[in-house]
Amino acid sequence: MASPCRLILALDVETKEEALALARPLAGNLAWVKLGLQLFTRHGPGIVDEFHALGFKVFLDLKFHDIPNTVSSAIKSLKGRPCSLLTIHTAGGPEMIARATEAARDTLPNCQVLGVTVLTSMDQTQLSAIGVQSSTEEQVRLLARMGTQAGLNGLVCSPLELSILRSELGAGPTLVTPGIRYPSAAADDQSRIMTPAQAAAAGANFIVVGRPILKAADPFAETLKIRREIGEAL
Ligand code: C5P
């Protein structure tokens, strides 16, 4: 049987106050929130503690990409912060990934480290511009294999890559996917999309949803609808 799929709300807003106003009414009916560079840069690491104190598990999406020592030191600086998922770029290479996961094991024992393979904003033209001649799919597979061998707990991927990565890497790695939309709704800037139920069926352990909930007339109802659709029990 496939492992359960869970919903993560991406709090992509300008200020902590806006994020709190959106998240507070959902406490108790939503387990996970994603905090990214925008809020982290504005408010600092204490924001992780604040959302955790409201009862949320925190996905800290900072996508670290630097030399091994710097990434390892940055992760050590998060010591004690209650985050449960953290991102780095697989493009940093196996040595960086190994040092990052080692640092997380020591300082954030309850946190999984996920690797971003190819950003969903990159197409073939963008990849060629940075010297990558293989197809996007080949590049994603290469980075996913290398990343999991180097110690990553999981990967962030587009929904269209879920089934390939699941069949290639097995049940072990945690697969987290953005790009969730209903056919009737605006795709915004996402082009490689699936519905929540399709992503869950394709092997996602987590779906990350931002605008479809943030811009819904009733974010609470939308949250419950998506949770129902992926069969998530709190
Ligand atoms: O609003 P929407 O549902 O498109 O938000 C998706 C979230 O997933 C955003 O926080 C976005 O930054 C993030 N994300 C993404 N593509 C990636 C990695 C993260 O859309 N490759």
Image (cartoon, helix red, strand yellow):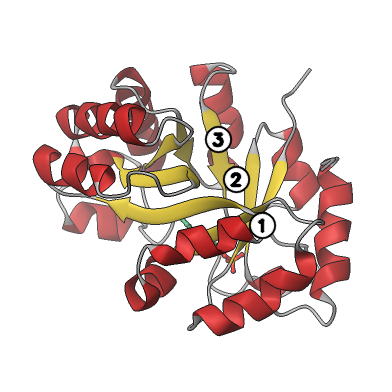
**Image position, residue 41 (x, y; %):** 33, 72
Say what amino acid the circle numbered 1 marks: Ile
Q: Please state which of residues 182 and 37 is positioned toward the viewer in this rendering.
A: 37
Dots 3, 1 in contact, CB < 8 A: no
State the residue position of label 3.
175
Q: Please state which of residues 169 and 214 is positioned toward the viewer in this rendering.
A: 214
Query: Residue at point 71% right, 43% down?
Result: 6
- In three-dimensional space, the C-alpha distance between marks 2 and 1, rounded to whole angstroms, equals 8 Å
Rendered position, 189 above or below 204: below
Query: Residue at point 78% right, 72% down?
Result: 25
State the residue position of label 1.
180
Rendered position, 205 above or below 167: below
Q: Is mark 2 within 8 Å of ligand 1?
A: no
- In three-dimensional space, the C-alpha distance between marks 3 and 1, rounded to whole angstroms, equals 14 Å
How busy is the neighbourhood of tag 2: few (under 14 within 10 Å), some, or many (20 plus)?
many
Which element carries disc 2, helix, strand or loop? helix
Q: Is the N terminus in the top left, top right, bottom left or bottom right quadrant?
A: top right
Dots 2, 1 in contact, CB < 8 A: yes
Say what amino acid the circle numbered 2 marks: Pro
Which element carries disc 1, helix, strand or loop? loop
Q: Earlier in the sequence, mark 2 or mark 1?
A: 2
| Any part of residue 146 in sight | yes
Q: Relative to 99, is 138 on the left or the right?
A: right
